[in-house]
Amino acid sequence: MSDRSEIEWSPRVSLAKIRELYVNEARGTVEDELIEEVGFGLLARCQSIMEYTAACEEGKVRCMRCAKQGQTTIIQRNMSKPSALIRCPVCGWQVRWRVYKNESENYDGQLLAGHAREAFTRYLAVYPQSRTREEKILAIDRLIHEFHWFIMKEDQPARGNKPAAVNLLRGNIVQVYGLLNELTYGENTPPELLEGKSWWLEAQKRKPDQG
Ligand SMILES: [Zn+2]
């Protein structure tokens, strides 16, 4: 096994799973197993996003081989050299930064947190603490409806650039928008979820490409 092939990230969650979760939730028949599957899938994906972001922005690369053994080894790379060698002092795993970056960018969707960093960080803190199914679904709902925010001018409200869900769900931007807009809610849906939906519809109107 080559050092390069050990570069692995958690995949995006399928659109079908999200749809299934909401359909069943609206009917009041959602099973804990499905909530956990989606919830932990998103959690693992958020971990990958934040790990890759730290490698890019702070130069802190987590050793992929040690990680498989359940160990965390952070290797500080030389940020001024694009082809610097990253070498783990514990297990000997080594790869050039350029290779690490290329492999990661061609892996599965966008891994960089960008302007949605807060949403990913918040989910990482909130989901593991959520006990009831309602809390878990709310955390999931809030995460997938977030945006990559950016500020055009200091005195104007932040604008939603693109859904954070493009980093999280297996689809292109059109498919992700399509899914988020069609998600069903029923009489069993908690009010917070419905509020989230109207917030989402409102926020979309503030997208820059729609004026
Ligand atoms: Zn290692």
Image (cartoon, rainbow, N blue to C red):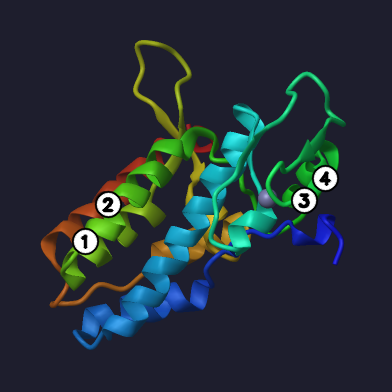
| Of marks 4 and 1, the one in the foreground | 4
User: Callout 1: helix, strand or loop?
Assistant: loop
- Label 4 – label 3 distance at C-alpha: 7 Å
Q: Which mark is residue 95?
A: 4
Disc 2: CA contacts within 10 A as few (<14), some (14-19) or many (>=20)? some
User: Callout 2: helix, strand or loop?
Assistant: helix
**Does the beta carbon at disc 3 come under 8 Å from ligand 1?**
yes
Rendered position, 191 above or below 111: below
- Label 4 – label 1 distance at C-alpha: 37 Å
Identify residue for label 1. 130
> What amino acid is found at the position of numbered circle 4 in the picture?
Val
| Of marks 2 and 3, the one in the foreground | 3
Identify residue for label 3. 93
> What amino acid is found at the position of numbered circle 3 in the picture?
Trp
Disc 3: CA contacts within 10 A as few (<14), some (14-19) or many (>=20)? some
Q: Earlier in the sequence, mark 3 or mark 1?
A: 3
